[in-house]
Amino acid sequence: MSAINTYAERMGPSFSSALWVTGLLLRLGMIGVFIVLLSFASRTAWPFALIIIADLFVFAYQVVRFVNAASLFYNDTGRFWTIVGASVGYVVAGLVTFVLWFQAFMVVDAALSGNRSARTTTDNSPSILETRAPPKRFRMHLSLDGRVLTYDGIMSSGMMNELEPLMSQSPDLQQITLNSPGGNLYEARRFAQRVLQYGLDTHVAIECSSSCLLAFTAGANRTLGPGAQLGFHRYGLDFKQLMPYAEADVERLQDQRFFEQQQIDSRFIERYFQDDRRALWYPHKNELLDAGIITKR
């Protein structure tokens, strides 16, 4: 039995080889491959998918070989703390590897998501420069001459992250055309501030209601298309759990000051903020003109 055990120990992996060659050097090599790919191929999915799969097998091989070598080394020398120190090195290398795997996975996921988005884009009109949000939430497009930006849909959380760059990169922009039932109050306020900042006109083609009115009223010149309507209702918080720190009266006073700043008739503002919340009020175009909501027919 002793001869057999001695032969098995000689044939097993050496501790120094498992630690430095198939351990440290091989791991540094794989880490280097990840870093090179992240630097020069950060938008291509297939190299990262291949290297993640390959490195799963490489790392498993390294761990198994190290465990076998460490077991033989301990039986031969009894040097426990040397094995502990080497094991800590493997743990650190493993953590670095997992971070790189995660970054590589994010590249693969982003590339696949981009392909899915490209396949779902159906409007290829050459007359429109367009950026899209999630389906059925909002859609915005810039006319070919760069003068009119049209916003269709709900005032959604995060919409200004797409809208602000489009506005700032359109030096010829003159008008915002709105078609929205309202939505996120804070996003609508950000929209209104950008309209003011750039001195833009606003126009409603179909309907602008609720918080959409903030963006519309920010316009230098404000107009309605044929049959277009503006819908008003008293402020309230229907989904308090989504904005636990918001108070309806505080929000109302802030926007009331904004409407006053925009030279809206005080009697109209008073009715706006005291009217029935359960239904929208659609004033006649003459009322809107008299109150200063629209600036011309």
Image (cartoon, helix red, strand yellow):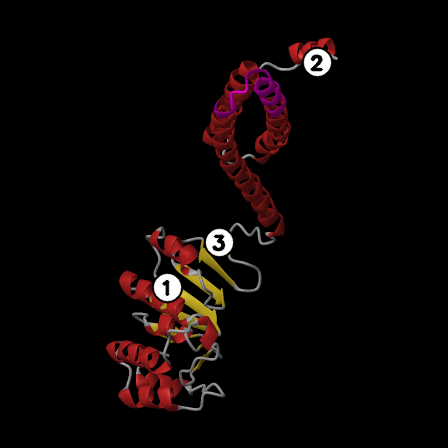
* In this view, 230 is above or below 108: below
Which of the two discs, 3 and 1, sits closer to the camera? Answer: 3
**Viewer-proximal residue, 277 or 79?**
79
Residue 79 located within the stretch drawn in magenta: yes
Q: Mark 3 or 1 closer to N-term? A: 3
Could you say whether the residue bearing mark 1 is in a helix, strand or loop?
A: strand
Percent x, y for residue 21?
54, 15
Residue 267 located within the stretch drawn in magenta: no
* In this view, 258 is above or below 84: below
Asked if residue 276 can be seen in this view, the reply is yes
Could you say whether the residue bearing mark 2 is in a helix, strand or loop?
A: helix
Percent x, y for residue 1?
75, 13
What residue did someone put label 3 on?
131
Q: Which residues are magenta?
A: 67-81
The quarter of the image holding the C terminus is bottom left
Instruction: Identify which amino acid the numbered label 1 is placed on.
Output: Gln
What residue did someone put label 2 on?
5
**Viewer-proximal residue, 231 or 222?**
231
Would you identify the image quadrant in which residue 262 lies? bottom left
Instruction: Identify which amino acid the numbered label 2 is placed on.
Output: Asn
- Cβ atoms at labels 3 and 2 below 8 Å apart: no
What residue did someone put label 1 on?
175
